[in-house]
Amino acid sequence: MSSFWSAWIIVIALGNIFACYWLVRWTTKKRPGEAAQGDVTGHAWDGLQEFNNPLPRWWLWLFYITIVFSLVYLVLFPGLGTFKGYLGWTSQGSQYGAEMDNAAKTFDPIFKKYAAMPIEQVASDADAHGMGQRMFLSYCALCHGSDGKGAKGFPNLADADWLYGGTPDQIKQSIMMGRQGAMPPHPALAGDDLDKVANYVASLSGRTEGVDAAKAEAGKAMYPTLDCVACHGADGKGNQAMGAPNLTDTTWLYGSSLDTIKETISKGRNGKMPAHADFLGADKVHLLAAYVYSLSKK
């Protein structure tokens, strides 16, 4: 960091602190012509009147304490440009490094032990299951839910339906490298043609309720001529190598209503599973994959 930007940060940080102090002092200062303490100031709205009452002393002292605390903090810890603070603390310094080293000595042998075991065997280990569950709650539950049953746009990991495959190696690959799903939009397909194709797609899973049989039949004739076949196949059963969903089952990632199917066809869908290889490492991913594998094997 250059000396200019260091000075800029110092001025901004300290300037804001002292500006807060000045603001409090300025608002508590008595001014000529101001209403006496306890009198009405003349401001009224909807039957409410403003009285000239000072701020509570305890509130003012708490505010002053926070100002003093911030100054002491900036003296002891980094926060003022290139000034490192008198304690010399850094996020990657000896304290953090020592904590990580101690954690590695304790937990790395455990992860390596399970990494040497097949995922199927790890999945049946009670201790490994508990560790994998805690990792899942920390890193995966935000999207897939604490029970792994997903939500709209986020796959259910507790059933037997897999976009990219449910074998141990495929699950591990999904966690390690992530997945990028993309359903291209089809804006040219609209009106009656869109309605026909949507009805046909809905009928592939055996639905009859809410499906217009005549339109579905017409959509069936159109389906092979569209680029849907390239991903979902002529039979609509999808392609795990591409993450293309099976349209013939009853699992719908974004919903199965005709309106939702039309939206998916016309506007497309985009889903991203972030990669965890660099973040967790192969050994931890192995344990996490075993837990995910176990969710669909209950």
Image: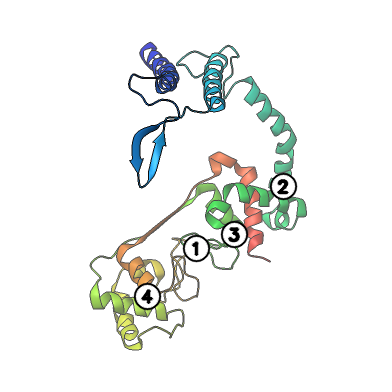
**Which quadrant holds the C terminus?**
bottom right
Q: Residue furthest right?
A: 126
Please name the amino acid that badge 4 sits on.
Leu
Question: Measured along the vertical axis of the image, is residue 159 above or below residue 289?
Answer: below
Please name the amino acid that badge 3 sits on.
Gly
Question: Measured along the vertical axis of the image, is residue 233 above or below residue 113?
Answer: below
The kind of secondary structure element at disc 3 is: loop
Residue behind mark 3: 148
Mark nearer the N terminus (1 vs 2): 2
Residue behind mark 1: 163
* Disc 4 and disc 3 in contact, CB within 8 angstroms: no
Please name the amino acid that badge 2 sits on.
Tyr
The quadrant holding residue 18 is top left
Judged left or right of residue 217, residue 171 is right
Q: CA distance from mark 1 to mark 4?
A: 22 Å
The spot of residue 40 in percent (x, y) is: 39, 33
**Which quadrant holds the N terminus?**
top left
Q: CA distance from mark 2 to mark 4?
A: 46 Å
Mark nearer the N terminus (3 vs 2): 2
Mark nearer the N terminus (4 vs 3): 3
Q: CA distance from mark 3 to mark 1?
A: 15 Å
Which label number is shown at residue 13?
Answer: none
